[in-house]
Image (cartoon, rainbow, N blue to C red):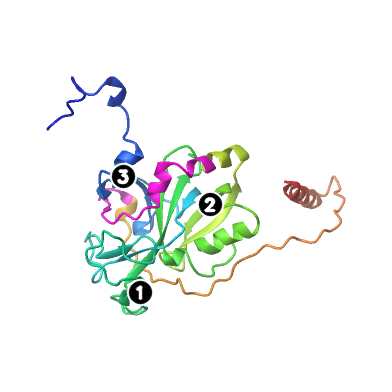
Amino acid sequence: MSELTIFQGGLPSYLKNVELDEDTKSMLGGNRGGHRISTANGAFSMIVDGKVIATREERFINVVIVRMAQNDSRTFYDGAYKEGESKPPQCWSSDNVRPDAGVSTPQSKTCAECPNNIKGSSASGEGKACRTSRKLAVVLENDLDGAIYQFNLPATSVYGQGEPNKWPLKPYVQYLGNNGVPVGAAVTEMKFDLVNKGRINFRPVKALKENEYNIIRSRAEDPAALNALRLTVAQTDKVVASTPALTAKAKPAPVEDVEDAEEIVPVVKKAREVEKPVADSSDKDAKIRALIEELGDDEDEE
C-alpha cells in the first residue's frame, strides 16, 4: 500500500505542516537520531535527525538539565576504533546491570562479571573495553520551551574529584544538592577541560526564576525528555563535511573510564555571622561588600 487510504484526497490541511510527535519518531528507528548535542571533534554541535544544524565556536555551552538517567549505560565495540567507521556495538546495557534483551551477542550474563568490564581489556590495554556513559536531557539556556536535546557523557565526565567550578557531573550535582538546590533550578555551563582531553566540566552560572523552574519541572515529563534518556544503539551521525568547526579539528583520542576514582563530595559551609560594616558613601569597596552581604541575607530568607 503506497499511501494512506484513510486520508482520501491526501493529508488534511491541518497535518501538512505538523511535525511528527516524539512518540511517533521513537518508533521510526534509531537512525532518525532526534535532537542531540554532540562533542565530536572537540566542539558542541546541535544534531537533529542525524544532521548537524549548528556548531558552537566557543568551548562551552549553557544549558538547563531537565532530567538525568539514574543509571549508567554501557556499550561494547569489538576491536579498536577506525577513522570514518560507523557500526553498532556488539553488546550494550541500559541499566549497567545486564545486557539488554535485544543483544544478540551478549558478552556475559551480567556487567559485573563481564571480562570487558576489567581495566586493561580495551584495545589500548589501559582502560575497559566496555564503555560507561550517562545520558542527560537538556534544553538551551535561552530556549527553555524549545527542543529537548540528548547529551551523552563518558565516565570521565561523570565521575572523579574535580575542583570548585570544574566538576564532573556527579560531584557537581552533589554540590548543588548539598546546598538544597535541585540541578534543574540552575543554568549549567558545560565546558571542555583543557588538560583532560574529552572531559566536560560543569559549574552553575545562574539561578532560574520561579516561573522558569516551573517550566523545567513540567518538561521533565515530556516524552522528548524520556526518549533522550534511552540508549539507542543504531544511532549514526551524518556529519556534513563542509561544517568548518568539524573539519578543522582532528578527532580526539578516546578517553578511559575513571568510575572507580575516589570521590570527594564538595560541601559549602555557611559562613558565620559577622557584624556588617557601615558603608561610607565615598567608599566604593565598602558599598560592594554591603551589597554582597545584603544579597546573602535575601538568599537565607528564601
Q: Is residue 146 visible?
A: yes
The residue pinned by badge 3 equals 26
Q: Is residue 67 left or right of residue 235?
A: right
Identify the element where label 2 is drawn.
strand
- With respect to residue 92, does 49 lie above or below? above
**Badge 3, how many Cα within 10 Å: few under 14, some, many 20+?**
some
Q: Nearer the viewer, mark 1 or mark 2?
A: 1
Among numbered discs 1 and 2, the one appearing first in the sequence = 1
Q: Position of residue 228 (x, y in %)?
A: 39, 49
Disc 1: which residue: 117
SS state under label 1: helix
Q: Alpha-carbon distance for marks 1 and 3? A: 30 Å
Q: Is residue 226 magenta?
A: yes
Q: Which residues are magenta?
A: 217-244
Q: Amino acid at mark 3?
A: Ser
Name the residue: 48% across, 57% down. 191
Magenta-drawn stretch, dominant element (helix, strand or loop): loop
Figure disc tally = 3
Q: Position of residue 214 (x, y in %)?
A: 57, 40
The first of marks 1 and 3 along the sequence is: 3
Single out the residue that lies furthest toward the left: 1
The amino acid sitting under disc 2 is: Thr
Q: Quadrant of residue 79?
A: bottom left
Nearer the observer: mark 2 or 3; the answer is 3
The residue under label 2 is 188
Q: Calculate the distance from the C-alpha at mark 1 to the C-alpha at mark 2.
A: 31 Å
